[in-house]
Image (spheres, rainbow, N blue to C red):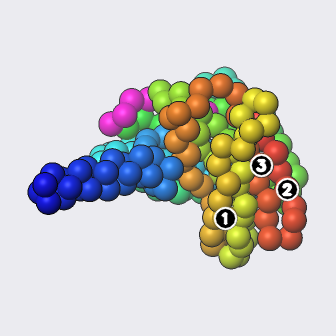
Amino acid sequence: MKNILSIAAAMLISTSAMFAGAIENPNASTGMAIMKNGTTIKLFYKGTRPADVKVSILDAKNKLVYAETIQNVDGFVRPYNFSNLKEGEYTIELVGENGRQVERVNYHFGKVEKLANVLHVAGEPSKYILTVANKGADVLTVKIYDSIGTLLYNAKEEADGDFARIYNLENYHGAVTFEVTDSNGVAKTLSL
């Protein structure tokens, strides 16, 4: 009887850890996201294991503006300075072990004080990547609501500089709204 209880307890703990990991470890996924802040475009990438990743930036006429290969990485944050480029639409293409991912960027002059963005992770309909431009250390409150306003997720996130995290909402399928509030009470609402 004691052995059966021990086995049942171990199974309960491992199952709880597995389901908790889906929310507690939202970074266990792959994807890319773009964050614009003034003349700088930041590319966030998360892969499943170390591999070479090729990044290409093309203008509106599909002319290659910049390309580089980042070797043997499973994730990175890379800033790209657009200050010497003309205003317009650009395509950022990332080719790696997980295939080809493309994001379009509308680049316009001007300074953006605070910016947040949320996107679906490519090929993962229940995963979202949230990026928030931030200077210095801050505590962000992230709330995720479903289409009728029911709270799905609520947590404080430590941010030291720019912030990016992948959220796995595997138990919910439908439209979501992210609400991000910084320590000064400045809020941004993003819907998908």
- Say whether residue 58 is left or right of residue 101: right
- Residue 179 — which label? 3
Taking 140 as reference, is 28 above or below it?
above
Q: Position of residue 44 (x, y in %)?
A: 54, 50
Secondary structure under tag 2 reads strand
**Quadrant showing the C terminus:** top right
- Say whether residue 20 is left or right of residue 92: left
Q: Amino acid at mark 2?
A: Ala
User: Is tag 3's residue or tag 2's residue first in the polypeptide sequence?
Assistant: 3
- Specify whether residue 99 is painted magenta: yes
Q: Position of residue 187 (x, y in %)?
A: 85, 56
* Cα–Cα gap, marks 2 and 1: 14 Å
- Say whether residue 185 is left or right of residue 161: right
Secondary structure under tag 1 reads strand
**Quadrant showing the N terminus:** bottom left
- The residue that appears at 70% across and 70% down in the rendered structure is 139
Taking 74 as reference, is 87 above or below it?
above
- Would you say residue 173 is visible in this rendering? yes
Q: Which residues are magenta?
A: 97-103
Tag 2 residue:
187
Q: Residues within 10 Å of mark 2 (few under 14, many from 20)?
A: some
Tag 1 residue:
156
Q: Amino acid at mark 3?
A: Glu
Whether the residues at callouts 2 and 1 have beta carbons within 8 Å, the answer is no
Q: Position of residue 3 (x, y in %)?
A: 11, 57
Q: Position of residue 30 (x, y in %)?
A: 43, 41
